Amino acid sequence: MMPRLIPGVLPTGSRRRLPKRRNMVPLWTPDPGGQLIEGVIRVPTALCNTTEHTNQRLKFNAWITANLERWVEWRRRKGWFIASDVDVAEPTDPPEGDRLRGKERQAKVEAVIGTNADAGWVDDFDYAQEYQWCVVQARFTREEPLYVGLEDMLFLRHLALKYEVDPDRDFTPFNPLPEPVDEIFVEGGEDPMQVAEARRQRLGLKREDYLFDDVWKPL
């Protein structure tokens, strides 16, 4: 987006336009303890779920430690400093969604835009037989804040309040959702579609502005 311009006058009398100076505001983490950030460590399956006090377990611990040190150093170079202990989850199988739909998505893309010898497909996915994922979480703080335009920040706060989202909440790498249940009972038998439409009307929204065709498919 081009910055807004204000008129100016050159010594020759010709008019010119200069970018208008923007008011900037600092961004600090809402939680004084820092922002919770999540990462993933790819661990060879042979090192996972090993017996305590064995060479394989020592190799597993060394692998986790080395990757954590790289993660913390990478964050530090971006201005984030670790401010809490690191929580390391147990190894789990990597997700399969991309692998299962890879060929289907590739065929659709080639049908739309064709093929190119310079383009290459990413097919080196993690398989459960080769790698496991360890999810790590830790809080990081900043010694120097990031800055954003005041008008941009006010606009984002306006959107958050409009959609009933607390703009001052603690940011997390996941959405807090209620526990899933097999059946949902609503006293009075409310229609969820009618409830959603009533909320949209209360917020001044139109359903047709948010409809897309096959969002999960590329192109």
Image: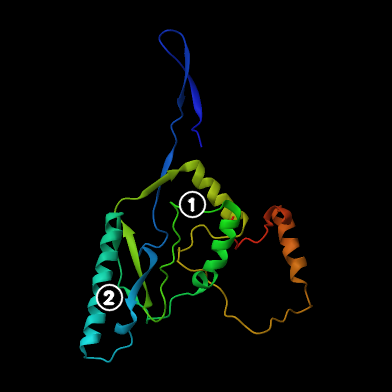
Residue nearest the observer in this picture, 154 or 102: 102
Dot 2 alpha-carbon crowd within 10 angstroms: few under 14, some 14 to 19, many 20 or more: some
- Which numbered dot is residue 3? none
- Residue pictured at 59% horizontal, 80% vertical: 180
**Residue with the most extreme front position:** 117
- Above or below: residue 163 compared with residue 137: above
Tag 2: residue type? Ile
Q: Position of residue 168 (x, y in %)?
A: 48, 58
Element type at mark 2: helix
Determine the image quadrant of residue 212: bottom right
Residue nearest the observer in this picture, 133 or 17: 133
Element type at mark 1: loop
Disc nearest the viewer among 2 and 1: 1
- Residue pictured at 47% horizontal, 74% vertical: 95
- Report whether 117 appears left or right of 181: left
Examine the rendering and report whether any part of residue 218 can be seen: no
Dot 1 alpha-carbon crowd within 10 angstroms: few under 14, some 14 to 19, many 20 or more: few
Q: Tell me the residue that label 1 is attached to.
A: 116
- Residue pictured at 46% horizontal, 29% vertical: 20
- Residue pictured at 36% horizontal, 63% vertical: 34
Q: Position of residue 153 (x, y in %)?
A: 49, 47
Examine the rendering and report whether any part of residue 146 can be seen: yes
Q: Tell me the residue that label 2 is attached to.
A: 64
